[in-house]
Amino acid sequence: MVTGAAQGIGLGIATRLAEEGASVILADIAHTKADAAAAGLVKQGLRVSAAPVDVADDGSVNALARRVDAEHGKCEILVNNAAIGADTHIETMTMEDYQRVIRINQDGAIRMTMTFVPLIKKAGPGRRILNIASIQGLRGWPNQIAYATAKGAIVNFTRALACDLAPHDIMVNALAPGFVDTPMSIQPDGSHEYDSDWFRDIYVKHGRIPMRRFGKPVDIAGPVFFLCSDDAQYMTGQLLSVDGGASATF
């Protein structure tokens, strides 16, 4: 189960897991996009389906869990990826702005986890929960009060959850992407973040991203697969940064 899987990082993760043999559900509030993405992957011979979900709504998440239970009887891997971006400066942000981001980016992952843990336990030992955090959950960033707060919470949610679920042999980890080329990279004026003078000067020319490029969804999908594979069977409560080295230069 991958939330926010209609596009971007979520779709990259879902594709890689399906390529490795998993039967994957692309869950997204943008159900038309998810349906189209799933159809494209099915044509490639992958076992993929799509399902609508609003991670901010109890009824929607419960309905998704009932569907998974009826169709599969279990969930072996849950990837909490669904999130929205927002520019929220403290002097202009409203509580409504703040709470919307928290409701989706933070509470959505917690809601999905609470609802799906029984299905994950039904799948037996060695199951995985993978939360997509962000390097912004570890560092400050202008105009990202709500987003950074939510992603920071995801990091510690992962650690605490790992402690709760370890006795059930369910491993819980988080991955913190850096700058990745997704629809969230498009600025309010329609330009791409990567093309801005300030970004190219600081992060590319002067190497604040040592690899001097944006990441791609496929760059995130590989490490996610590792954390969900048997090669990571003694890892839990950990955060893995995948950011081209950006966090090393802060």
Image: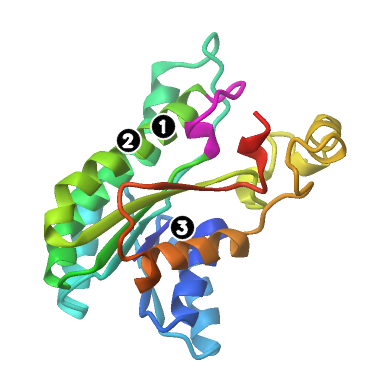
Residue 115: name its quadrant.
bottom left
Closer to the N terminus: mark 3 or mark 1? Answer: 3
Q: Which residue lies furthest to the top in this view?
A: 91
Q: Give me the residue at 31% from left, 47% from top.
A: 237
**Which residue does the numbered mark 2 point to in the structure image?**
156
**Which residue does the numbered mark 1 point to in the structure image?**
152
* Numbered disc in front, either 3 or 2: 2
Residue closer to the observer: 69 or 202? 202
Up-down relation of residue 75 to residue 243 (above or below): below
Q: In the rendered structure, which amino acid carries the disc numbered 3?
A: Ala
Q: Distance between the residues labelled 1 and 2?
A: 7 Å
Residue closer to the observer: 187 or 150? 150
Image position, residue 54 (x, y; %):
33, 51
What span is colored magenta in the figure? Answer: 135-144
Q: In the rendered structure, which amino acid carries the disc numbered 1?
A: Gly
Residue closer to the observer: 233 or 149? 233
Residue 201 is left or right of residue 56, and the answer is right
